[in-house]
Image (cartoon, grey):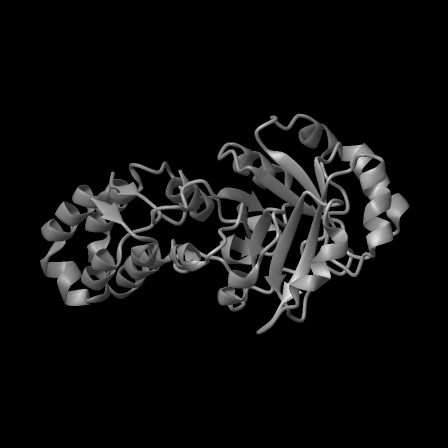
Amino acid sequence: MEISGNEINSIKTFYDAIEKELISDRNWGRNFNALRDIIMGGFGKTEYGQPFTLMWKNHLESRRAMKTDFDDIIALIKEFQHVELQLPNGMSDLKLKVCGMRESHNIGQLLELRPDFMGFIFFERSKRFAPDLDKELLLGFPETTKKVGVFVNAPIQQVKEKVRQYKLDYVQLHGDESVEYVGELFAIGIKVIKVFSVGDKFDFDRLKPYKGLVDFFLFDTKGKERGGNGVVFNWEVLNDYSYDVPYFLSGGIDLENLEDIAHIKVQPYAIDVNSKFELEPGLKDIVQVKMLKEILK
């Protein structure tokens, strides 16, 4: 059986629903432990439990159903526990970038999931600013996960230094960096992802001067912050994209709207996720990211 992205609910919903039952009725705890073991069986022990379909949610939201239909709920969970999660046709080749990483332990956890790109923000005003990364950890990255340094109007020497210090594979320029700025990095072999903020409209002619100097464009939502706003822009704007430079899609992507990417005429090379997959700024919810990786397989 296949489950679409729209049927996948929040990672915490099941755990929170059960927790409410425990608070209201301590005697229900003996069933909770058995149910929790089944839910988490396929995904390992985690404090948040496993994602589940809206069908399960409808059963569990009713306190009466939880008390009287316990066996039915277990049967449902067993039935869906090992389902194959798939994206619509044409989206299976999407690469994944997880941005805003900072904590060494969290970075190590994410590496086990083998994202294609991992981003580290070197912008002091960001809530996910990474001033002191574990150099040894970053230098030991596998070839399968590319390191991306994110900068906003930084002095170009600082960019070069961070590339050298952490052996960054790409720099992501999230500010108003000029063509000359990007050209200087290109000239010394630094690979560039140039970011453009998109609102209800976008003039794609702005990209033309950068073509030939960048490896990727990245389209993010125009907002208060330079990235990490957690808001989706109108993806229909990208139907007018006509360049042969591959692009990353960012801005408010989560498990529920992931399937909508299939409707974009020119598909992105990769998706860039951040705030929607966090426990707090700079700390990713590994269970949610694991679910995303399962869908992108």
Q: Quadrant of residue 28?
A: bottom left
Residue 274 visible in this rendered orientation of the protein: no
x, y percent for residue 178: 83, 57
Vertical position of residue 231 compared to residue 97: above or below? below
x, y percent for residue 141: 64, 28
Question: Is residue 286 found left or right of 102 in the rendered image?
Answer: left
Vertical position of residue 297 compared to residue 247: above or below? above
Please state which of residues 273 and 285 is positioned toward the viewer in this rendering. 273
Question: Is residue 130 found left or right of 297 in the rendered image?
Answer: right
Vertical position of residue 9 compared to residue 133: above or below? below
Q: Quadrant of the C terminus?
A: top left
Q: Quadrant of the N terminus?
A: top left
Q: Residue pushed farthest bottom?
A: 200
Please state which of residues 256 and 53 is positioned toward the viewer in this rendering. 256
Residue 142 visible in this rendered orientation of the protein: yes
Q: Quadrant of residue 294?
A: top left
**Residue placed at 57% from the left, 56% from the top?**
250
x, y percent for residue 174: 72, 56
Please state which of residues 119 and 60 is positioned toward the viewer in this rendering. 119
x, y percent for residue 228: 61, 60
Question: Is residue 142 found left or right of 254 in the rendered image?
Answer: right
Q: Quadrant of residue 58?
A: bottom left
**Residue placed at 80% from the left, 34% from the top?**
189
**Residue placed at 63% from the left, 68% from the top?**
202
Question: Is residue 146 found left or right of 91 in the rendered image?
Answer: right
The tally of labels here is 0
Please state which of residues 91 and 59 is positioned toward the viewer in this rendering. 91
